């Protein structure tokens, strides 16, 4: 007999493992309700949607990155963003809820496109953190552009099946040269 889910954490644990075992598109809400051993109203008391089980962990990861930006006292914006993104990515245990959520995103293009919507929130969080630390003299547009570029590099990395901190760090290190080299200089 399977244990009854009694909290959001318990539902998340069961659901994330089921998504990884069977594939996100192959798991219905009814499958989740059965696996958790709860009624439909109880399930929806804890979870707003099937997507939210994955996306809420991705959103929390974005909040963690913004927190790391706020804690970094470097004056170089790109260094701050690189270290925050790489630090958060490096500390991500593949078997944690957030780690499982990223693994689900890597394997499921449909939910990955939903996760892209979260980057607007991430961009706002990172922009606010950069402006608060007076990067680019508090110029919100420049801070937002830097945040958007950092998020783009991060998305390219986590979408790959063999994503790693080294790949992400290399992308950050190479990005400034890509934006300053003219085509006729190659």
Image: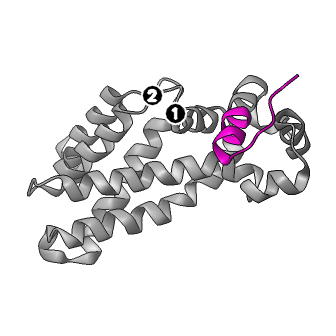
Q: Provide residue 135's location: percent of width, then percent of height.
A: 15, 67
Q: Quadrant location of residue 87?
A: top left
Q: Which mark is residue 70?
A: none
Label 2: how many Cα within 10 Å (few below 14, some 14–19, many 20+): few
Range shown magenta = 1-16
The answer to whether marks 2 and 1 mark residues whose Cβ atoms lie closer than 8 Å is yes
Which sits earlier in the primary sequence, circle 2 or circle 1?
2
Where is mark 2, residue-wise?
93
Label 1: how many Cα within 10 Å (few below 14, some 14–19, many 20+): some
Instruction: Give the distance between the C-alpha atoms of the residues marked 2 and 1, in whole angstroms.
Output: 6 Å
Q: Residue at x 33, y 57 (%)?
A: 66
Q: Nearer the viewer, residue 36 or 49?
A: 36
Q: Residue at x 48, y 23 (%)?
A: 162
Q: Residue at x 25, y 55 (%)?
A: 69
Where is mark 1, residue-wise?
99
Residue 180 appears in view: no
Q: Nearer the viewer, residue 29 or 134?
A: 29
Residue 99 against residue 112 in the figure, above or below? above
Q: Provide residue 22's location: percent of width, then percent of height.
A: 79, 26
Residue 176 appears in view: yes
Q: Is residue 15 magenta?
A: yes
Q: Kindly state the secondary structure of the residue where label 2 is placed.
A: loop
Q: Quadrant location of residue 161?
A: top right
């Amino acid at each position: 007999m399977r244990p009854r889910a009694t909290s959001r954490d318990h539902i998340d644990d069961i659901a994330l493992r089921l998504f990884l075992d069977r594939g996100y598109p192959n798991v219905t809400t009814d499958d989740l309700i059965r696996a958790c051993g709860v009624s439909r109203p109880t399930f929806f008391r804890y979870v707003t949607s099937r997507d939210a089980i994955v996306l809420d962990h991705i959103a929390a990861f974005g909040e963690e990155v913004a927190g790391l930006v706020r804690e970094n006292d470097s004056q170089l914006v790109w260094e701050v963003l690189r270290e925050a993104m790489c630090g958060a990515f490096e500390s991500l245990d593949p078997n944690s809820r957030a780690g499982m959520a990223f693994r689900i995103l890597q394997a499921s293009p449909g939910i990955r496109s939903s996760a892209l919507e979260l980057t607007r929130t991430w961009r706002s969080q990172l922009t606010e953190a950069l402006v608060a630390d007076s990067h680019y003299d508090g110029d919100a547009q420049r801070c937002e552009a830097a945040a958007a570029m950092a998020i783009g590099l991060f998305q390219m990395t986590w979408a790959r099946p063999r994503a790693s901190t080294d790949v992400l760090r290399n992308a950050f290190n190479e990005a400034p040269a890509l934006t300053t080299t003219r085509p006729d200089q190659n």
